[in-house]
Image: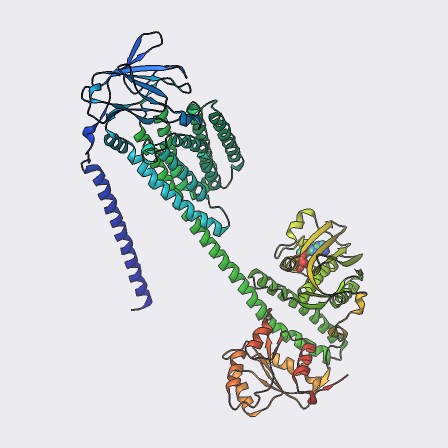
Amino acid sequence: MNTKENKKILNIINMMSKVTLLIVAVIIIAIYISGLICLPKFEYFDSEVQNFTEEWTYEKPDGSGEAFTMPVSLNTPIGEAVTIHTTLPYDIASGEYFCILTGHKFDAFVDGEPRFSFDNAAAYRWGGSVKAMYVPIPILPEDGGKTITLLFNGTDANNGTFREVVIGDKRGIHQYVASKYGIDMYLAFILAIFAFITLCVFTILSIIKKETLPLVHLASGVLVCSLWVINDSNLFQFVIGKPFIDGIMGYMMTLVVTVPFCLYMNRIQGERYAFLYALVEAFLGINFIVVSILHFSHIVSYERSLLYIDMVLLVVVSIIFAFGVYDVIENREKVKESAFVYLGMGMLIIFAVAEIAIINISVVRNDQVGGILIIVGLYILLFCAIMDQITRLRTFQLQSQAALAATKAKSDFLANMSHEIRTPINAIMGMNEIILRESKDENITNYAKDIYSASSNLLNIVNDILDFSKIESGKMEIIDEKYNLGEVISYVTSMIKVKADEKKLKFNVTASEKLPTALLGDSKRITEVFINILNNAVKYTPEGEVSLVISSSEIDSEKVMLEFYVKDTGIGIKPEDRKKLFEDFERIEYSRNKDIEGSGLGLAITQKLITLMGGTIDVESEYGVGSKFSVAIPQTVIDGKPLGDYTKHKNSSQNESDKKWGIFKAPECHVLVVDDNRMNLMVIKRLLAASEVQITTAERGSHMLELIKTNVYDAILLDHMMPDMDGIETLRQARQMPDNKSMTSPVIALTANAVVGAKEMYVEVGFDDYLSKPINPLDLENMLVKYLPEDKVIMTE
Ligand code: ADP
């Protein structure tokens, strides 16, 4: 079976298992729902509890009576005492209670005899009772037919609101309340767990992603809502047994519950209405504080603020709804991405409005339906929001994977391209070097000089691209080594001086004599930074002067801030172009500067290198007048002795820089050069012609293996990238050959792979050293002087 068939079978099995799971889920849900609907109710204790629906009499203050049945809201002023009475049933069993649902203080009398007092003083400490509870008044079989009178004399509430009375024993009342409010509590409890788990999972994800995911807000909102339903349930007093606090918590939650929803919608709507949401959130915060202070200081209890609190809730919900509708109209395309959320929010709002209506509009407060409504709405919303968040995360993951792949592909492409370009440049520069050495014709020498300058520029661009791709792919390393600051400054200034002279620009250098002599840092990269900025100053200054000022300031006992600025009297940069300066491949005023060579990468690389070294770069510029680039890079001091006159510091290669080739002769030495590119072989041969070294060439690794069986070479120059067998493999096989006559000869890698750490890599695989292409004639000669037997090398001066 081939892999295609395998994949097909795997797909079919996958699909079948998903369908099976779905069927199982549907079966379970169907059995559960049908069981809930069809199975008979388990009613053990029903006989021991009954709703008391008989007529009551309200004893008005003027002495007259008003008949009513519960539930009722008598039109009595807040704080006025209310007395009501009714006749107890005849069939009272022992152990029964006359259980009234109220939160207000009262005294109960049976036939005028005091029987029971309910004092809500405990709630007073918490600002007063705000929620009704089932208060059991004990009654006896002999009380049958007697009058029970209840005197509500609390001063903090409307004493004229009565909801229900049930008569039953302890178990009966428990069972009654459980069956009436159990479903709300049960659903709310599961929702609370569900929301809590969601909150935990997405909080952890947020921490990992270092960004708060919107679902964290929504899960908090749903959690508060479900806790509110749990607190609001009349089962709370039987489960937790701490009345009063449930009601207070319920109000507090109601006051703030819309905040997480605002936070959530703000994120979902791409923070398009952030200011307005912030205003709403601020208002809700202040509102919470004010209303709560009023409650706890007994000025206006939560219960008396109920209408206001619900109005605020309604207004905020309407605002969220209005923003949603407006957003749907204005940003149709963006809203489509959040369709799930809008669906969920819409459903919740419908259910919430129904809930508020049921609680407030009708006196007939139907706790059962109300609670379930909002919970169902919340389940739908949470489910929709999770779907939305998962879709978002998935889209984000796919997008970032695609972006990463694209960046990697781009970096790889640039790195490969610059590698591929280096090989032909090696041939061009090498051949040109030979023409420069051998031509006696002035015209041809001048042409060759032009080729030299153009190919050097091309090489610089290729190097920039390589640097850029290394930085982009995070492979750029800063390699700290000890270096002499004076040497860096004199190298940089001597290079720039030549260019400034060519353009007849004045080049001023001021280097503080107090600069430390030796520092620890990446001198190669620091040199690059100096040269890039100075080169630009020279390039973009048609006339006038370029100044370089270098100083340092102490950071601590070990570190200094190396500071320098480059000022020119050049074309300057417009303020609007300044932000483009450090962008990749961005050239400013291209039409004006198109004759000036550049890739638009120099400053981008410079800035990234400076950042990698922990430094900063700033630009000041006046269009048409000139620019000033200021750089500060922290460096560790190795030798704090003042540098003095920097021009006195020149490194050995600089001293020899005038001498380009021909530093030694070694006619007795035998060197093997292996490269698949015939032109490169020719270049090396010609570059070493003056040294009179005997050179053998090979175009394949296999050819080299043949040659070393019979010849002893003083050194081998081995190209890395070759077809069939590359340099590394050739070297490995050579080292394993028992008949290798050049076993101890130094092997130097030739490579266009000029990445940082290349030397370490080549040394690790067994090379003695490496030379990067395009080959610098002097580097080549120095390398051979280093590795050829001393007694066979004659230095020419
Ligand atoms: P380029 O290779 O084009 O010089 P850079 O990244 O080094 O690229 O610079 C980006 C652009 O910033 C240049 O194209 C040039 O327009 C502008 N620029 C840089 N240095 C100067 C300067 N000293 N004066 C004026 N313009 C400058």
**Which of the 4 image quadrants contains residue 373?**
top left
**Which of the 4 image quadrants contains residue 104?**
top left
Query: Depth check: 592 or 721 in front?
Result: 721
Query: Depth check: 711 or 201 in front?
Result: 201
**Which of the 4 image quadrants contains residue 552?**
bottom right
Where does residue 469 sit, x and y in percent of width and height?
58, 62
Q: Is residue 212 left or right of residue 465?
A: left
Q: Is residue 285 left or right of residue 662?
A: left
* Quadrant in which the C terminus appears: bottom right
- Residue 792 visible from this viewpoint: yes
How does the figure colour the protein chain or chains? Answer: rainbow
- Residue 327 visible from this viewpoint: no
* Quadrant in which the N terminus appears: bottom left
Where does residue 435 sit, x and y in percent of width and height?
70, 78
Q: Is residue 751 above or below residue 631?
A: below
Query: Depth check: 87 or 233 in front?
Result: 87
Which quadrant of the picture is home to ligand 1?
bottom right
Query: Depth check: 261 or 499 in front?
Result: 261
Q: Is residue 119 above or below residue 262?
A: above
Furthest-bottom residue in view? Answer: 710
Q: Is residue 548 above or below residue 88?
A: below
Where does residue 96 sit, x and y in percent of width and height?
23, 26
What residue is drawn where x is 25% and y is 25%?
97
Where does residue 615 sit, x and y in percent of width and height?
66, 57
- Callout count: 0
